[in-house]
Image: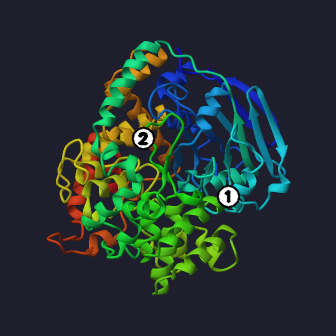
Amino acid sequence: MSGYTFRSIRIDLSTRTVEIVPTPEMLCEEYLGGRGFGVALLSDAITHSWNAPEMPLVFATGPLVGTAAPTSGRMSVVSRSPLTGTIFDCSVGGRFGTMLKRAGYDYLEIVGTADRLVALEIDGDAVTILSAGELRGRTVSEAAAGYDSSWSTAVIGPAGELRVRYASIMIDGHYSAGRGGLGAVMGAKNLKLIAIRGGGTVTVADPAMLATARDAIMRLLRTSQAVFGEFGLAEFGTAALVDLMHARRMEPTENFRKTLFPQAGAYSGYAMRVRFNPKKTGCAGCPVLCKKIGEGRAIIPEYETVSHFGALNANSDLDTIIEANRLCNDLGLDTISAASTIACYAELEGRTVPPAVILQILCEIAMREPGRGDALAEGSLRYAASQGHPEASMSVKGLELPAYDPRGAYGMALAYATSNRGGCHLRAYPVSHEILRRPVATDRFSFEGKARIVRIAEDMNAVVDSLTACKFVFFAVSLEEYAKALSAVTGRDHDAQSLFRVGERIWNAERALNRANGFTVMDDDLPQRFFREEGSSGARVSILPIDRKAFLAARANYYRIRGYAEELASHEETR
């Protein structure tokens, strides 16, 4: 089978041993790569604490990485989350996945805890563990400064070293394995930095067939308004969503107490393009290039970041938003959880946090400064609970919600609740149907049909993350096109249905691992605010509380479709 190197690396930092291990063919067949590899590799260790030496931290490529398949340059980072306690994966771009594959490896598994701060260098066949004491406390940019463009780096900032529960791992400076605190897992292992380079090639079984599959994918991409349209991702990046969510009255504002921020136009994708005249960049192997870099190398933030450091914190100052994003990248913080935790703090304090103080708090959090910084470094749920008001945390399973208010899109409400990793829009994305109206428009204020839409999207995205492709592409293409690309690369026959079965296997495995750590039906729920409080209405749109009975009925239907009826029955018996 082509597309894999059938070699991987296992490193034990406690003993400083490096082992080159075969990648099992059964692993490739049943879990594909990326997220699937991580799920399988964590299955025997998942009940260990996130900071136990036995807990693996996995960096995994997919079978399309290093090939001509579009958007095939991503990888998955997988471990157990310090923030949620769930199994957790982050799909991340940049060049690290491509370099890992070209160095001759399918995945990198790290266990153990070093007795001092270390760095890891992988230069083709040479794998070296180095002392990194001089990098302690350094920012991401400072720590990576010693490596030129021939290397790709994965670095934690001070936040990861100090185990902030939502610390990120930064790839190549500004691609973030951000959510869930995997940077804290890396910090708990006393691993500051991984640098990798490789110059090998990836074998493809049928290059001509892959070229045909690539052409089909590219034709569909070029016709997609969401991707390459005048106001699409290629032109404005994900910040193109600012104006759309504003118009639909579903932009989370002031810790989700409102759903409309009148000053949102100050940081829209259009406003940032006019001001910064950004250039396009993106992950290895990507034709979309949704990342934007402005004059002076300013990184244009993603939609979630601008919305949460904007509306969620009642802040319209674009300079502050840009600087908050830069600080989070350099200190190694997840922008969504950081902004959400500050918004939660603001609500409990009964005041709006001024722009300059937002930046000050980010530094306090990253350095775990005694008092406010250390308390907020625990995340919004733990902080709110410590203040006697856990209901002020807008999170599911402890993971802070992204920038789509569920009162404005009921499919998104169900997807947040059922997500295996917590409040997340990347497990399923019903907003595609409900707001973007692709591939089929659905009523955003109804649960009808949403259970099946969510289930299909969850399985599909498990496949996408295991192929390590980009979800944005699937606004235009389907698993049918990627099944042909995968068949061309591997030489094995795949179709959409066989890939969906793999996705279902991965999803159910994740849920089983969460159950082993005590997660139940009771955790598949939303903050009560969404069932009790209205959002902001106007422009012929009323954002009303979600009907609790309708939500529970949709969730029960989801369990039935998933085959989780026994879980629901057991929950009902114990109520």
> Relative to 445, is 53 above or below?
above
The kind of residue on which mark 2 rests is Val
> Relative to 461, is 276 above or below?
below
Quarter of the image that includes the C terminus: bottom left
Q: Position of residue 113 (x, y in %)?
A: 77, 47
Q: Position of residue 11 (x, y in %)?
A: 74, 36
Say how many tags the image has: 2
Q: Position of residue 208 (x, y in %)?
A: 43, 13
* Disc 2 packing (10 Å; few <14; some 14–19; many ≥20): many
**In front here: 199 or 249?**
199
- Label placed on residue 160: 1
- At numbered mark 1, what does the secondary structure look like: helix, strand or loop? helix
Q: Is residue 39 left or right of residue 551?
A: right
The kind of residue on which mark 1 rests is Gly
Residue at image position (57%, 53%) is 81
Residue at image position (36%, 71%) is 264
Q: Is residue 126 left or right of residue 574?
A: right
Q: Is residue 469 left or right of residue 194?
A: left
Name the residue tied to disc 2. Answer: 288
> Relative to 328, is 452 above or below?
above
- Label placed on residue 272: none
Residue lying furthest left in this view?
A: 540
* Disc 1 packing (10 Å; few <14; some 14–19; many ≥20): many
- At numbered mark 2, what does the secondary structure look like: helix, strand or loop? loop
3D distance between C-alphas at marks 1 and 2: 31 Å
